[in-house]
Image: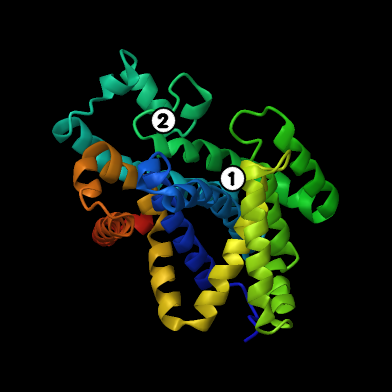
Amino acid sequence: MVLEKFDVSITNASKGMALMLILWHHLFYEKPEMGLIVFQAALLAKVCVGIYVVLSGYGLSESVKKRGLELGAFYKRRMLKLYMNYWLIALIFVPIGVWFMDRSLSSVYGEHVFQGFLLQMLGVHMFTWVGYGYNATWWFMSLIIVLYAIFPLVYTLTKKYPLSFLAFSAWLMFVPIPLVNDWIFPFAVGVYLSQKDGFVKLLVWLDKQGKARFITLLILTIAVAWYRQNGWLFDSTRADAFFAILLILWTTELVVFSSVAKKAFEFVGIHSFNIFLFHTFIYYYYFPDFIYSFKYPVLIFAVLLGICLVISAGIEKFKKVIGFDKLI
């Protein structure tokens, strides 16, 4: 079956896959005692960041196709949505930590509580003395806010000088730009794939190979995964744009083949941003003993995912009750 459009349902399914990789990575990347396969898979699962960055570039570019690129409207719509969801999760989980979990603001920010928390809520904390702050996973907010801010420039340059700008953004990975240097390239790749309808073209090319496409994908995935962990120069996170694309293609093949998988991955994907924002509170700050008490990696993962989905579904219902979407 040839996919005619790489639409929102497919990107949501891919976000669902990325969210599951986030959970696996965070649960086990510091747990070699869980076994070699679990541990190595957790290290590789850090590609989740690359997947989100590629999909962010792709999604923003797709929105421009529909609405055009009017800077004022773009920044108002996108930044407001980003911040409002971030602040809502903080409003729910930070007071729980302060009042019930013995994680006070002063224990994190010292005597500069107001300044530290404000910097974190503005999403610029990773560029300041605050560092990771109240929730280490929120480092990504500092990255994504910068990527959103530079998107109009990235979009324009990718459209005018596609290959030249991709080469330039790849070169930037070797320039010591705080936090963002490793991620401008996969972000630009996502924009490029949207502008050139790249995912559909890749899937059409794979489809022409028939069942052999799975062998092709498997060989490429193993090669890139190995190089990511063991290669030179373009290794580690610098290889994640390519690794991310391969995993997105695998996810697409799966959800096109199975309607059940499509619904499951898409459901997780719809809740992925909420869960990204709060899952660290559940498994690390608040209830680590409970989560890891299930002993077996797959069961630990399933329990955390299930808990997070239930909490996120509750948050979404709360949003509807208070008319949250009307505020954005």
Q: Secondary structure at mark 1?
A: helix
Q: Quadrant location of residue 256?
A: bottom right
Which residue is depicted at the point 23% across and 48% down?
291
Nearer-the-camera pick, 5 or 210: 210
Which residue is depicted at the point 36% across and 35% down?
135
Q: Is residue 302 above or below residue 185?
A: below
Q: Quadrant location of residue 90?
A: top left
Measure the C-alpha gap from mark 2 to mark 1.
17 Å
Mark 1: few, some, or many residues within 10 Å (few <14, many ≥20)?
A: many
Left or right of 93? Residue 236 is right
At label 1, which amino acid type do we have?
Tyr
At label 2, which amino acid type do we have?
Gln
Mark 2 and mark 1 in contact? Answer it, CB < 8 Å. Answer: no
Residue 95's mark?
Answer: none
Q: Position of residue 140 (x, y in %)?
A: 49, 40
Name the residue tied to disc 1. Answer: 148
Q: Position of residue 145 (x, y in %)?
A: 54, 40
Name the residue tied to disc 2. Answer: 120
Which residue is depicted at the point 72% across and 67% down?
198
